[in-house]
Image (cartoon, rainbow, N blue to C red):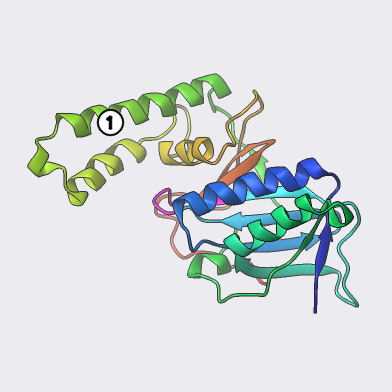
Amino acid sequence: MTVRLHFADAGEAADLAAFLARLIHYDKAAAVRLQAAGETLAVFGRPPSFEVLAIRTARLAKPYEYGLDTSLDVTVSAGELLESVGESADAVETAGTMVVPAAVTGPPWAGVLPPRGGWRQVAGLPSMSEVRALVQGAVAEFRSRVEELAPELRVRAELDRVGREIWSRVVPGTELPVRAAHAAQALGFLRGEALDLLSAGAWLRLRTPYGSVALRRAGAGTLTVTPA
């Protein structure tokens, strides 16, 4: 059965395509979990090494509906989804629509999503410009420390050790690891000036109008599985 989603406008499709392309840059075989209900599509991905969940939403032109189903929840190939978005953008008669690819067996993270509700604002997050500067400084420090290593020491284990030391630091005034802000920057989310830090149970979420990254606090214990 062909499932087709209708975007509110071409810009929504373009933004989703950009997000998928960034995910695939980090993982050619990336999978994403799609959840559509009402007029909102949420796309979840997990870029390797950042240890966060990335969330991008898109507005739909009309509520999702297929037969008697009123919601969509499926894990698909990010590459196939990107192709579908691109094909719809190139075809005048289907512009603003997307065919949902066939389901794939999802990776373990796809069964563990942040809660849908219950989020509350967390105080203390620096401004957008300060967070961007923090990420840029951390990237520069990583490169500098790697360059200072003797060639024989530039092995994966040592690079990972340096990376863990830098990216596990927290954003001043918060519990948010710097790696979460780095992930948001790498995925194109740290734009404009609006930036929020939210919490729900053991989860933290860094949110901008362009997307969110979410992760569990260190030592939070067993993951909570969001039912499909």
The quarter holding residue 192 reads top right
Residue at image position (90%, 77%) is 68
Residue at image position (68%, 70%) is 74
Q: Is residue 87 above or below residue 121?
A: below
Q: Which quarter shows the N terminus?
A: bottom right
The quarter holding residue 78 reads bottom right
* Residue 33 image point, x, y percent: 63, 63
* Residue 46 image point, x, y percent: 51, 56
* Residue that badge 1 annotates: 143
Q: Is residue 104 above or below residue 136?
A: below
Q: How many marks?
A: 1
The quarter holding residue 179 reads top left
Judged left or right of residue 3, residue 145 is left
Nearer to us in this view, 46 or 115: 46
Nearer to us in this view, 169 or 38: 38
Residue at image position (35%, 36%) is 169
* Residue 47 image point, x, y percent: 48, 52
